[in-house]
Image: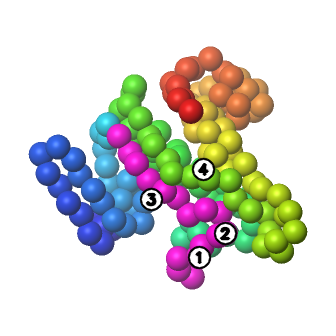
Amino acid sequence: MAVRAQEITENYALYNGDCIEVMGGFPDESIHLSLYSPPFAGLYHYTSDERDLSNNPDYETFLEHYGFVISELHRVTLPGRMTAVHIMDIPKGNTGRGDGLFDFPGDVIELHCQCRKPDCKASDFKRRKGLCGHGEWEYAA
């Protein structure tokens, strides 16, 4: 795993590193709780690395990139366990004249609800909206 820093105890493990690389080293269904704060889609750019989640040209590309993170979370999380995400609405611009907001929390919830079963035969719409009936994930606001 590409871990820059870690702390592992009898009760928990904390990792600091590239989330895709770190999660790639975890076995399937091995995590009880994940807690994280993703880059807020363009508000901050942490590195110039094209693999960096904070380095996307626009909001839609960010969400596509972020989908890989969520797919890995689905893979490593034990059934019935939780993921907690620190997020907020994101300004669409910075003019200070009512630029509006992206509903980042709503988009993250929708990404988490998407069906990730490779053999799902439901329509693309039902898969995207989590309406295919697999019921793997439940969400609390």
Dot 1 or dot 3: first in sequence order is 3
State the count of labels: 4
Whether residues under marks 2 and 1 lie with C-beta atoms below 8 angstroms apart, the answer is yes
Judged from the image, the secondary structure of the residue bearing numbered disc 2 is loop
Give the distance between the C-alpha atoms of the residues marked 4 and 2, in whole angstroms: 16 Å
Residue annotated with mark 2: 42
**Horizontal side, residue 38 vs residue 93: left or right:** left
Main SS of the magenta segment? loop
Q: Position of residue 5 (x, y in %)?
A: 26, 69
Label number found at residue 67: 4
Residue annotated with mark 1: 45
- Residue that appears at 63% across and 35% down: 114
Dot 3 or dot 4: first in sequence order is 3
- The quarter of the picture where the C terminus appears is top right
- Residue that appears at 68% across and 53% down: 89
Dot 4 or dot 1: first in sequence order is 1
Label number found at residue 20: 3
Q: Is residue 84 magenta?
A: no
Q: Is residue 51 visible?
A: no
Which quadrant would residue 60 be assigned to in this image?
A: bottom right
Task: Name the amino acid type tagged 2.
Answer: Gly
Give the distance between the C-alpha atoms of the residues marked 3 and 2, in whole angstroms: 19 Å
10 Å neighbourhood of mark 2: few (<14), some, or many (≥20)? Answer: some
Judged from this view, the residue extending furthest toward the front is 97
Whether residues under marks 3 and 4 lie with C-beta atoms below 8 angstroms apart, the answer is no
Task: Name the amino acid type tagged 4.
Answer: Gly
Task: Name the amino acid type tagged 1.
Answer: His
Give the distance between the C-alpha atoms of the residues marked 4 and 1, in whole angstroms: 18 Å
Magenta stretch bounds? 33-51
Judged from the image, the secondary structure of the residue bearing numbered disc 4 is helix
Judged from the image, the secondary structure of the residue bearing numbered disc 1 is loop
Whether residues under marks 4 and 2 lie with C-beta atoms below 8 angstroms apart, the answer is no
